Image (spheres, rainbow, N blue to C red):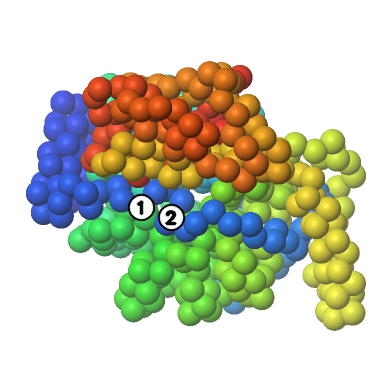
Amino acid sequence: MIILGKAGRTPGSGLLRWIFGTIIILMVIAGINCIGQENDQGAEEPQQVSQQTGETDLFEAQVRAENAEPDQENGLSGKGPVAGENLTVHFIDVGQGDSVLLEYDGKTMLVDAGERDQGSVVTAYLQDQNASSIDYIVATHPHSDHIGGMGEVLNSFEVGYFIDSGFPHTSKTYENMLTAIDEKDIPFEVAEKGEKIEFDPAVDIEVLNPESEYSDELNENSVVLRVSYGEVSFLLMGDAGLETEERLMNAGSDLDSDILKVGHHASRSGSGEAFISAVSPEVSIIELGAGNDYGHPHAEVLERLQKASRVYRTDLDGSIIVTTDGSAYTIITQKTGSESENQEIASYKETESQEAKSEETESEEVESEIRGASGSQESSVYVSGLSLKDEWVKITNKGFSPVSLAGWKIEDDGNKHAYSFTSFTLESQATVTLYTGEGTDTATELYMGSNSPIWNNDGDTAYLFDNSGKLVSSLEM
């Protein structure tokens, strides 16, 4: 069965009316300011975090999936694995965001599509896999680092079904996505806990979240999926955090999974100790951008994951591909942005020798430190604050050299308003506040000179583009 939630709708003129009607109802119930108060990366202050991982070279790992006996109660229904057929799950490197592609027997499912500037990356990746259409698209929740690229994907492929968390958002990004779905007459459904997505009879996909009553925290309404193929299972957490983890454990949900797509980019808002123990993953995969401004992955969470599992990260390993025949799985990583990405593939095999493990870890830590110091190509300038009510946006230079912002641009969601910097230089470790109204520019304060408000108090996103037009940072509130 296809997900048919109580709030499910097929598109047409009623879809947008339902979504925006729901927005109005939520505003009345919870107050306008309760929607979109947390930015898409969480409320953590930007910080520097040691970036170490168990892998630093291109490699292929063959791992035997254990302790995953199939039975009807934990969702392994249908015809089961087919001889010669593999399920392939791609964790696509979209920088600071999420995008996951599932492939099986000619069918495809896309879960999230990264930021707006990553839509072309996701589209190209799918085309490289010879995908001509997408059977299912799932938007885990309406933050821009998960749905920003949806517009380009929707315009590039024929889509069978679109599944949404059902929790509306007032951002232009979300509105544009819904408009595209409506215009293309794509069947639109709302995910409901306990329902199954009939991707293929051999592949069991169960919705574990969201609850029927939504949380005030948008991330906690993320669509959480448990995917099982024979004895191998995946848990895709979206941006769900501690609140959702506790609910899932208290409800007795089957969380035990071989591969965990870590929630919320391994921020401190999720991946609690009890939850990781309940999932008991062999492999943990973190989707995040190199040198991101949010301190992801958080050091304590990363350490916890490394103790429990083998950790892979898109910022260090590039796109990560897991292929399984239902009893074993193979992991291939592809580093990006490095001249060494086409070098010889190294094989990794689990060993019972503790001494060999120790030597390997020491070698990997050294190489990780080298790559962490030189591998990031991201800008040192980022959007560090946004006040929708007080009408200001803050831009910070975390680097060790001044940066000329001449030709750089700040835009709001939907590009309704824009401000271009002229000859301003942002000093090292300095922050400038850009106000909407009028005033006298200084080294720390700039003014757009607008007599009208720019930022939407119900939810908006500040986009920062460099002088070549490249999106270097965004902050959603």
At x 42% / y 64%, what residue is drawn?
A: 241
Name the residue carrying label 1. 38
Amino acid tagged 1: Glu
Q: Quadrant of residue 171?
A: top left
At x 46% / y 71%, what residue is drawn?
A: 255
Q: Quadrant of residue 336?
A: top right
Q: Are marks 2 and 1 in contact (CB under 8 Å)?
A: yes
Q: Is residue 403 left or right of residue 345?
A: left
> What is the quadrant of the C terminus in the image?
top left
Q: Secondary structure at mark 1?
A: loop
> Could you say where residue 374 lies in the image, as x and y percent from the top left?
79, 45
> Could you say where residue 22 lies in the image, as x and y percent from the top left?
15, 43
At x 30% / y 33%, what residue is drawn?
A: 455
Q: Nearer the viewer, residue 98 or 8?
A: 98
Q: Is residue 352 left or right of residue 28?
A: right
- Bin the neighbour count of mark 2 within 10 Å (Cα to Cα): few under 14, some 14-19, many 20 and up: some
> Could you say where residue 460 lies in the image, as x and y percent from the top left?
33, 37
